[in-house]
Image (cartoon, grey):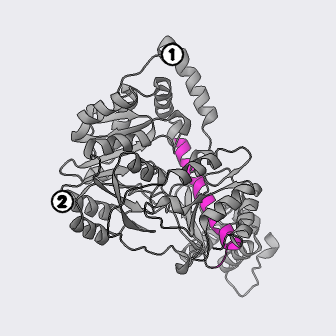
């Protein structure tokens, strides 16, 4: 590589390094999401100084071609265009009853088929598996716990794990009483309990649009009505639309993912999250925050949980370890605040308790430091995977496709254009050994027929890239 850089060239040395990186990108030798050689390694290869390489990388960062990540180095970015972003949808006039079970069941069946490329399941941990670490930890716990390992745990959760969670919320200035925190069987049970605490059959619940289909199905099962609030792909729901909806309807609660939305990947900045809480509490409306992806942010700082801005105690927080450690463990939690007595009663009625051995293992996983170390690795891999997937999608999909730029999590939202049918594409893809999630199930009002959600929470490799190419071919067969 040293022959590439010439000190007799009329261009400055750092400009030649910049051009080399551009050429590597154009040739496909260096792909979006991949890490550039370190400053020292590149300087040695090119026989130039480290400050020269640093200036080149910083100049490329200023031009938007590369991205510096703290304590990780420089990474190649994907070129994005403004026209590629999903469009804003209109605010619904009326809340609706929900009926999406049939298609949701088909999607669930598809993601669990053997030998299928699982773009349809949001399982970010697969990008940095924890199985070996957790296996070691569980063996240690079982040797300590003895016969207690097979017993029922406390109804509201394993006390040492609850203490760890309480300490972590202190980092955001949120004081949580142990009685207010209930360990649940995943975030889905936490959401169910939260909704049961603050609503009754027939009540109106505001949700994001598009919204995670598990929340839509939960609202259906509880006999509630859904009112969709349009979502900005960059920074969360449109507050003006929410304000209008609050004026027009008797909304009892809102279920929003303000940190990282699924499926769009939007990230609401803290100042807007504060405005959201102030708006809702001025109308005495409860906010149930689904915060399962909060720790998987790509932004410089994690979003502050909405509960930090509550002055009336009308914010309930739902989260879990399913997206950050072990989906099969089914360990989540609910911070219920003044609704704690109801929440504990519903938890006892619904499932009595959550697996003690799984809670104990996760507690030891946290205190060992392995949990936080793996989350850091997981965020890095997911971020790289996102860049690679977006690049592949731009190569394989029609130019009409609008692609989200998620600020965290593990999924990308794609609007293929009005001429395409995502349900038809779902069936075609499954026949070719690929599972996807049709956008149709992310709305209670039959929106997003032309949209799909794809997961990049996978071990990246040639098989994944070939599956994206195949999807691009199938898209052309999925016209209405």
Label 1: how many residues lie within 10 Å, few (<14), some (14-19) or many (20+)?
A: few
How many numbered discs, if any? Answer: 2
- Residue at image point 54% right, 63% down: 439
The quadrant of the picture occupied by the C terminus is bottom right
Q: Main secondary structure of the magenta part?
A: helix
On screen, 411 above or below 403? above
Q: Position of residue 123 (x, y in %)?
A: 57, 47
Q: Position of residue 425 (x, y in %)?
A: 66, 64
The part of the chain drawn in magenta is: 373-399
Dot 2 or dot 1, earlier in sequence:
1
SS class, disc 1: helix
Numbered circle sitting on residue 144? 1
Of circles 2 and 1, the one toward us is 2
Q: Nearer the viewer, residue 436 or 412?
A: 436
Residue at far right of view: 3
Q: Is residue 394 magenta?
A: yes
Picture quadrant where residue 240 is located: bottom left
Q: Position of residue 436 (x, y in %)?
A: 63, 57
Are the residues flagged by discs 2 and 1 in contact, CB closer than 8 Å?
Answer: no
Q: Nearer the viewer, residue 127 or 431?
A: 431
Q: Position of residue 447 (x, y in %)?
A: 48, 67
Residue that label 2 marks: 283
Q: Is residue 24 left or right of residue 257?
A: right
Q: Is residue 130 left or right of residue 155?
A: right
Asked whether residue 10 appears in the rendered view, the answer is yes
Residue at far bottom of view: 10
SS class, disc 2: loop
Distance from Cα at disc 2 to Cα at disc 1? 50 Å
């Amino acid at each position: 590589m040293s022959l590439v850089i010439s000190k007799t060239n009329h261009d400055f040395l750092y400009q030649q390094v910049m051009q080399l990186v551009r050429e590597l990108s154009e040739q496909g030798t260096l792909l979006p999401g991949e890490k550039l050689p370190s400053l020292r390694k590149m300087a040695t290869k090119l026989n130039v100084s480290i400050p020269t390489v640093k200036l080149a990388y910083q100049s490329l960062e200023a031009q938007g071609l590369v991205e510096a990540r703290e304590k990780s180095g420089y990474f190649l970015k994907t070129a994005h265009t403004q026209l590629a972003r999903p469009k804003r949808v209109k605010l619904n006039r009326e809340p609706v009853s929900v009926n999406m079970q049939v298609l949701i069941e088909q999607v669930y069946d598809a993601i669990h088929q053997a030998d299928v490329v699982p773009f349809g399941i949001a399982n970010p941990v697969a990008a940095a598996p924890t199985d070996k670490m957790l296996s070691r930890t569980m063996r240690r716990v079982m040797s300590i716990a003895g016969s207690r390992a097979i017993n029922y745990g406390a109804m509201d959760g394993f006390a040492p794990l609850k203490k760890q969670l309480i300490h972590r919320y202190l980092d955001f200035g949120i004081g949580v009483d142990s009685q207010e925190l209930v360990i649940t069987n995943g975030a889905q049970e936490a959401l169910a309990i939260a909704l049961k605490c603050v609503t009754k059959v027939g009540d109106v619940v505001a949700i994001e649009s598009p919204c995670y289909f598990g929340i839509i199905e939960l609202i259906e099962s509880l006999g509630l009505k859904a009112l969709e609030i349009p979502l900005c792909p960059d920074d969360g729901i449109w507050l003006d639309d929410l304000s209008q909806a609050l004026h027009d309807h008797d909304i009892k609660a809102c279920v929003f993912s303000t940190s990282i939305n699924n499926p769009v990947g939007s990230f609401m900045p803290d100042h807007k999250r504060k405005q959201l809480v102030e708006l809702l509490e001025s109308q005495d409306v409860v906010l149930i925050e689904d915060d399962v992806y909060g720790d998987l942010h790509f932004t410089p700082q994690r979003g502050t949980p909405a509960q930090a801005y509550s002055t009336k105690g009308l914010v309930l927080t739902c989260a879990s370890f399913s997206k950050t450690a072990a989906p099969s463990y089914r360990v989540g939690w609910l911070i219920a605040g003044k609704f704690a007595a109801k929440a504990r009663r519903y938890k006892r009625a619904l499932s009595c308790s959550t697996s003690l051995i799984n809670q104990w293992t996760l507690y030891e996983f946290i205190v060992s430091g392995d949990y936080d170390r793996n989350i850091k690795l997981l965020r890095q891999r997911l971020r790289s995977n996102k860049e690679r997937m977006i690049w592949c999608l731009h190569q394989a999909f029609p130019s009409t496709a609008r692609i989200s730029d998620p600020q965290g999590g593990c999924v990308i939202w794609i609007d293929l254009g009005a001429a395409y049918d995502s349900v038809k594409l779902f069936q075609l893809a499954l026949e070719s050994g690929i599972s996807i999630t049709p956008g149709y199930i992310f709305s209670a009002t039959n929106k997003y027929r032309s949209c799909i959600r794809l997961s990049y929470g996978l071990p990246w490799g040639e098989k994944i890239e070939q599956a994206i190419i195949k999807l691009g071919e199938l898209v052309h067969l999925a016209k209405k």
